[in-house]
Image (tube, rainbow, N blue to C red):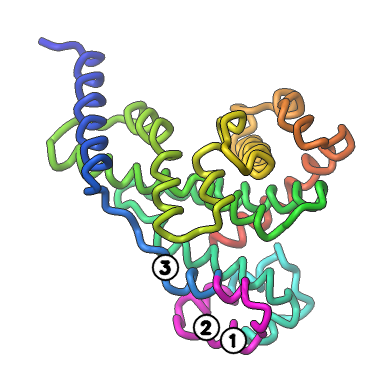
Amino acid sequence: MPSDFSTATDSLEAIERAFLRKVEHGELHLPLLPQVASEVMALAADPKADAAKLAALIHKDQALAAHVLRIVNSPAYMPRSPVVSLQHAIAMLGLTLLSEITFAASIKAGIFQVPGHEERVRTLWQHSLASGAFAKEIARARRVNVESAYLCGLLHEIGKPVVLRTVVAIAREQNLPLDKATVDILVEGHHTRIGGIIGEQWGLPKQVVETTQYYKDYDHAPSFRQECVLTCVADWLATHLLFPDEIPEETLRDHPAFVELNLYPNDVEQLVKSKDKVLAIVESMNL
């Protein structure tokens, strides 16, 4: 009788072979960029965009509009009085910030859904949100493009839910056991490649596509090294926030990427102190 170890190993290898076949043959089911997210991204790049255009765009999806208003009324954004309309929300937060909120809400609804694995997906989503928020804080400290940094942070692990969904489907189709360790190995091992494929298909900015592939290996980034290093730091900060036992504060502060970004100890201190602010944003987006 085979041991549990050999069974798990055999299952991992079989699922991985099937997964790679799908990738190589172009059979991987990739999500489409949600229509609202696509239009918001185009609107954000349009110098003629105005509040009326954004409000009209969000109103196309009433469920999304209601969700955006719940987020805007959350403690993270501390409105002095209830925000009752999208026009009011834009006036209070500005076009750029409300565009970011809408983009993120649309992505969550369209991508971060894997039936039967809700808790894991919720954790992936929280980590993505925290990474996006920390990326903005780092960009401000470095005086680089904040909106670009946010997109890099928010989407750097966009391949993870896709790998997860595919792996779960393969295991079900082939009647193979699928434990947490197997899922972790496959998701961690393949999400950067899949993230790059998704980014290309969605027509995301080149720096965003590259960070999905190289944020963990920024020394080999072909062209957007700074964005990859910044996203790596945002990823670490997000992990420290959500899983402090995994990356304790002393380990976090010693990360060489801080030096790469010319962030001094007082800059790092300010980033660490922003944890409560980032956590409030994460909680608001889960309303």
Dot 3 corresponds to which residue? 34
Looking at the picture, which amino acid does disc 2 mark? Leu
Assess whether mark 3 and mark 1 are in contact (beta carbons under 8 angstroms). no
Give the CA distance from mark 2 to mark 3: 13 Å
Q: Residues within 10 Å of mark 2 (few under 14, many from 20)?
A: some
The three-letter code of the residue at mark 1 reads Lys
> Which residue is located at x 24 percent, y 48 percent?
26
Residue 82: % across, % down:
70, 81
Tell me the element at label 2: helix
Q: Quadrant for residue 35, please give it.
A: bottom left
Q: Which mark is residue 53?
A: 1
Q: Quadrant of the N terminus?
A: top left
Q: Residue at x 44, y 46 (%)?
A: 195
Q: Examine the residues drawn in magenta and state their main secondary structure.
A: helix
Which residue bears the numbered disc 2? 57
Horizontal arrangement in the rendering, residue 80 relative to residue 179 (left or right): right
Side (left or right) of 227 relative to 31: right
Name the N-terminal-most of marks 1 and 3. Answer: 3
Q: Which residues are magenta?
A: 42-69
Mark yes or no: residue 241 visible. Answer: no
* Secondary structure found at label 1: helix
Q: CA distance from mark 1 to mark 3?
A: 18 Å
- Mark yes or no: residue 175 visible: yes
Q: Disc 1 and disc 2: Cα gap in Å?
A: 6 Å
Looking at the image, is 206 positioned above or below residue 49? above
